[in-house]
Amino acid sequence: MLRVGAHVSISDGFEAAVEREVELGGNCGQVFVGSPRGWAVSEVDETAAQAFRDAADERDVGPWIVHGTYLINLATPKDDLAENSLDCVQAELDTAATLGIPYYVFHPGAHTGAGEEAGVENVGERLSKVDVPGDVTLLLENTAGKGTTVGKRLEQLAEMVETSTNGYDELGICLDTCHLFAAGYDFTAEAAMAELVEEVDSTVGIENVHYLHLNDSKHPLGSEKDEHEHIGEGEIGEAGFRQFLTHQAFREKPMVLETPADEKGDSWNIEKVREIRTED
């Protein structure tokens, strides 16, 4: 079954987020567990958590994924920022576990001048300090590559996992289509898609890609600009998403949209994904 949904707000509570996802036409979803631009993590009591789990089960919406705050930077050379980031990652992971959400994803961060090698090593070493709950998998998201961010190349993500003591038993990968395209990974034609799948498999492993972020790109291949567009309306286009969404390597992965919040909206994008998939 195709599992596709959108990032939804928790402003009315986690249980309400399930109904919001259903209203959009989604059957899986993504949430923050605090402000995306702050360190505070929402406190969730067992009653609220159970209500969320029951609603998700009853409406058959899942798997869910928690997106980490944008402030997290495990690649940084600054010890205080790294410590705050680790504390936040741990708190967000624990909240995901309380809610019964099986996946948690964040951006690895930026080396801010220390160099890519040091940044990648920092991420791996700091991941070793995280206590990943047994029923949650921590996912690293690939980046577009702007500035000094690390995780643009798939081999960097693989190195982060392999440097950590957690390994693929506790860690995995979330691939963002806009980020892939902006980083220079083409998949708009059959041959290019085959090359991408081969590279994913030879670096992080297809089996370790647990979730997908579906976003078109406002900017050309290799631009390193992380600006999302509606599905099929950007530089990737419908042909590119047809290659990606129907390929055997990714077609069964759960996927959420982070497309622009404008008049088209999430429902339009969810339906567009379903249309493209049914063309296969």
Image (tube, grey):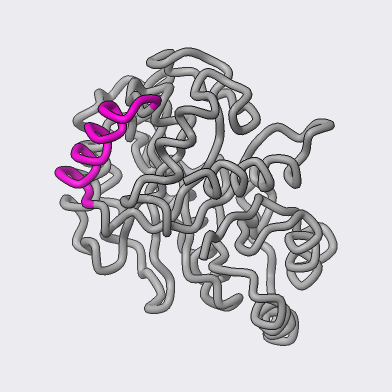
Percent across and percent down for residue 114 are 28, 24
The residue drawn where x is 26% and y is 40% is 197
Q: Is residue 191 magenta?
A: yes
**Above or below for 7 versus 133:** above
Answer with the quarter of the image where residue 183 lies. top left
Q: Is residue 86 magenta?
A: no
**Above or below for 104 versus 155:** below
**Mostly what secondary structure, the magenta segment?**
helix
Residue nearest the viewer, comparing 71 with 56? 56
Percent across and percent down for residue 188 are 40, 25
Percent across and percent down for residue 110 are 39, 30
Q: Is residue 128 left or right of residue 149?
A: left
Residue nearest the viewer, comparing 37 with 196? 196
Q: Is residue 52 left or right of residue 254?
A: right
Residue nearest the viewer, comparing 149 with 234? 234
Give the residues drawn in magenta, as a range. Answer: 188-205
The residue drawn where x is 41% and y is 16% is 221
The residue drawn where x is 70% and y is 32% is 260
Answer with the quarter of the image where residue 56 lies. bottom right
**Above or below for 190 versus 163:** above
Q: Is residue 88 left or right of residue 32?
A: left
